[in-house]
Each structure stands twice: as C-alpha cells, then as structure tokens.
Image (cartoon, grey):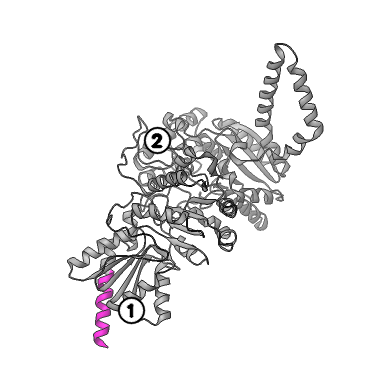
Amino acid sequence: MVLERIERENDIKKLSEDELKILAGEIRDFLIQKISETGGHLASNLGVVELTMALHLSLDLPKDKLIWDVGHQSYTHKLLTGRREGFDGLRKYGGMSGFPKRKESDCDSFDTGHSSTSISAGLGYAYAREITGEDYKVVSVIGDGALTGGMAFEALNNAAQLKSNFIIVLNDNNMSISENVGGLSSYLSEFRTANAYRDLKVGVMNSLNKIPVYGDRMVERIRRTKSGIKQLFIPGMFFEEMGIIYLGPVDGGDMKGIMKLMREASHIDGPVLVHVMTHKGAGYPPAERHPARFHGTEPFEIETGLPKHKRTTANYTDIFSTVMRKLGDRDEKVVAITAAMADGTGLKRFRNMFPDRFFDVGIAEQHATTFAAGLAAGGMKPVFAVYSSFLQRAYDQIVHDVCIQNLPVVFAIDRAGLVGSDGETHQGIFDISYLSCIPNMTVLAPKNKWELSDMIKFAVDFGAPIAVRYPRGEAYAGLKEYRAPIRYGKCEWIYRESEIALFALGSMVKTAEQVHDRLKEAGYASSLINARFAKPLDEEALGEITANHRLIVTMEENVINGGFGEHITRFYNECGSSITVLTIAIPDAYVEHGNVDILRKELGIDAASVTERVLEAYRKQGTERTDD
C-alpha cells in the first residue's frame, strides 16, 4: 500500500509517477472508509485529492506556507503530512481536528474554520517574509464559493500592491466562477451596453435571421460560442484587471498540469492566481450526485451513501423550517435570508414555496444583515437564518444598520451553544454576550420545540430587532404542558418551591429539570424558572425570587463573560439584594471539538456537575449564615 509509505511531510516526493496515481486512489478509498465511520467533510475533500498532491509535490513543507480557506478540505493535506493514524479520532474529543490547526502540525500554517480568510492571511505571511528577508513560498487555496465573501475581495485588492511572489489557488468546483462569486463579468458591462456595440449586435442578429434555413442556426451557434468564450476568458481577465496575474484554468485531476502552473507561478514577482477546476465528490458516485449532502456528513453506508443512523425525531432546524413555511403562507411580507446555508438553516422549503421572497446572498453575513435592514426599512419582515458562529462576522452591521435604526429584523440563530465536532471555530457560545450588550436588541431562547415555534411567531410580529437562539440537534419534547404565551421580557415559572431557584435559559432548561429532580431526591426544594429572555431580564420575577429563595442558580450555554448570569448578578448588586448567585456557564475559554455530551461534562454544565455545584454553594451559604 503506497499510502502507508507516507509517514511525514515531503514523503510524497519519493514516489514514482505510477505510484502517485495509485496513491490518489488509495487516498480516496481511505477517506470514504474513515468518514463513513466518523462523519466529516467528504465531497470537498474528494474533489481536491490531486490538487493537494500537486501542491505538496511543488512545495517544501513546513518551510513553505500553505493556507487552506475554511479548511474543511484539508484531509488529504493531513494524510500527506503523516497524520493517517489520527483519522480514527477525527473530530472526536481529544482527537484530530477536521480543520487545520497550528498546534497539531507545523505544516498547518494558519488556523481556519470560517470562510474567505486565506488570501488575507497569506498576504500577511508574504509581507512578513519581505520584512524579515526570509525565503519561502506562500500559497493560499480558496474555493470559488468563498469568493462570495467580501473579505476575499478586500484582500485581492490589497494583494495587487505586493511586489514579491504570492500564489493564490482558486479551487473552482462548480465549473462556473461567475455563478458562484457573482458579478465577475461586470467589467464588460459598459462595453456590452454601449450604443455602438448594441447597435452592431442587433444589426448582425437581424441580418442573420433573414437568411433562410441557416440563419437561425448561425444565431444559435454564435450565442453558444459567446457563452463559451465568456466562461473561458472572463475570470482571468477580471483578476488581471485587479493587477493579479492569472494562470489557467487547469483540470483539477491533472497533477502534471497543476505542477506546471505552480512552477510558472513561483517565478512571478507579485500576486498570481492559479485557476484549478475540481469536481466535488470525485471518485464516489453518491457524493458526486449529492455534493451538498456529503459536504458535512454523518456516518454513512458506503454501498448506498445513506446515513447509518436514521433520524426519527425532529431537530430544532426542522421546527424552524415548518414555522417559516407556515408564516410564509400567512404573511406575504415575511422574507427569508440565508448566507449560503439554505439546507443547513432549514430554509429549503421556504425557498421552494416562496422563491420570490427567499434570498441566498452567498457567504456574506455582513451584506445579509444590512440587506435585511433595507428590507425592513422597506416594510418587509425579514428573517435572517444563520449559525451563531457565523453571525459574529456581521457584528458591525447588527449595531449600525439594524439596532441604531431600531429596524424589525429577526435573527434566527441556529447552532447556538455547543455544536460538537467542528470545534472552536463553530461553537455558538458567544452570541448572548455579543448581542445582549447592544441597545434595542431583544434576545430569546426556547426551552423546547413548541416554544421555538411560539418565539419565531412572536419575533416576526415584534417590530424591532430581535434574536431567537436555538441549539443544534434533537428538539426537546419535554415540559409540553408548560406553554404560557410569550410576553415581552417575561419568564415562565415551571415549579414554584423555595430555597433554591434554578433560573435557566434555552437549552439549559432541560438540564435544570434534571437538576431539580436530583435535588428533590437529595431532599432539597428548588424552583424552576424558564427565563425565555436573555434580554431584557424579567426584573419583577427576579425580585419575587428573593422573597423565599436563598440561592439563585443561573444556567446558560454561553461563555460566562458578558452572559446571562453576569447580567443577573449585576441586577442584584445594583438593587442591594443579599441573595447568593451561582452562575453556571461555559468558562472563559475556546471549546475544542468532540461529542456534545462529553463537552458538557468537561465544562461542568451537565446535570450531575451542576447539581454538585449547587449543593456545595447552598451548604456553604447556609454555613455562612449560621456563622453570622
């Protein structure tokens, strides 16, 4: 087996041409086998096998710097740098990350996880090389989809000023740049719409149409030829206009062709773009037919491509999807926005039923937010469905374009809290902190699937900026009998007892219910309150709690700094209350990848850990009062 001979970086250079072909096949087989067991990003990785091999043959790692945009397509890179054995623990707690990590290997030049960052990072490396006088190559690999992110264009504009070599590899896996990045042919607009050109075009077409039999055929042939010429030349001309040398396109399966262009590119003083045409899912028919489904897949049966574990219950995204479809039926002002995540956020059904009110803006959360603000200003009811981690990219727009103007934009924040296998870059553990400090913003979190439905309906008719955050995974179906109407800024009492008040938000209500049962078994009374609102706080309820409780336990799946618990602590401090506050939240740290249940236990926010901390705080507080 050729793959077994790859024990460290640059071992690939010891192989013959025939062995390289064998290696490509073995890598695909290996990835299909391993990802079918662990889950992970398959289609994108199968598409870049030969491209990655060509890059490793062209570079001297780790001296040279190879930066992968997003990084979910770096599995072959990991194999070629001696991390084959790590795939058994891929994306598991304590195991190998599914993204490049500098702490994992010297061959990972830059940590990535979000889109459109590689050109900026690579340009930084290139200028650092100039300043320090070092000698190494810098290569940034960016997908055509990532070019829909404005940051990539900002970096391209800046890169044109560079005087030393910098290679950008465009991984074009949809065979059509213009469709994915949008507007790349706009530089021809003035020419194509000029009077002289338009008159000539109309005159020629009219004359040809008058020719019997052959005229129509000639017109159609010209149209097809024009389309083909635009497809071939427009992308390169666009980059050349920006001051970036363009090379390609080259077939992504042609290692020799890619290496030839890399050699040419490395001799150019300044930025150069190498255009590589790849095919997502290459080598595995199910992934080729359904690249979106195999972008990030759960464990699957290799023979069929079907999931090994079929989902039998609805998740929160499913609930949101259903509610949005119903709201679209009832109210023609409801519009939906996604940043290249129609399937992931549950907007596929809305898109199919109301195509004129659905907008996929590409990987452009900043634009999506201001676009939503414009829709709201125009009298619409925009719902921007977005992962918590990705919404961070639009913070300035949330503040300036939505909240300062107090516009009724709904942020449907999926994957809020711990998301698991994708790790630090994808954990949605900051949104309560970064949203609750913004004036005019309201933040809610549902305890179960019915409450999510109620909250989305409430949010759409709210008339001001509002965010509903909900977790990844199976929607909680407990506490069904507790469904008080959503009232602005009001919590929901579930169990009214005394001594200990469990004041939980969103996904932590389920945990609080378990803690309540554990405390009861241990002989301690406790109330359970569903906070519902992270902002504003229900100050009336907080005051009521102090009447017959000695300890309030705030519970949230968010970092402790700036979170729900800290706001409650400040409230009690400001009103001079003597009640003890125990804040249960995620520590001030980034959370690595792993199973969510394992992560919750490690972070001390699972039911057993919380119960232990509550009892310790309650007993300590009781002892202190006795001493007093």
Quarter of the image where the C terminus is located: bottom left
- Nearest the eye: 554 or 113: 554
* Residue 262 seen in the current view: no
Which residue, as the protein is rendered here, is positioned at the far top? 213
Q: Residue at the location (70% across, 48% down)? A: 160
Q: Determine whether, in the image, residue 526 is placed left or right of residue 315.
A: left
Q: Which residue is mark 2?
A: 32
Which residue, as the protein is rendered here, is positioned at the far right? 196
Q: Determine whether, in the image, residue 256 is placed left or right of residue 531.
A: right
Label pair 2/1, CB-CB below 8 angstroms = no
Q: Looking at numbered disc 2 in the image, what kind of residue is underneath it? A: Ile
- Nearest the eye: 377 or 500: 377
* Residues drawn in magenta: 613-628
Q: Looking at numbered disc 1 in the image, what kind of residue is underneath it? A: Ile
Quarter of the image where the N terminus is located: top left
Residue 485 found in image quarter:
bottom left
Which residue, as the protein is rendered here, is positioned at the far bottom? 628
> In the rendering, which numbered label is found on residue 579?
1
- Tell us which disc is closer to us: 2 or 1: 1
User: Under tag 2, what secondary structure?
Assistant: helix
Mark-to-mark CA distance, 2 and 1: 56 Å
- Nearest the eye: 55 or 288: 288
How packed mark 1 is, by other alpha carbons closer than 10 Å (few <14, some 14-19, many 20 or more), is: some
Residue 299 found in image quarter:
top left
Q: Position of residue 437 (x, y in %)?
A: 50, 67
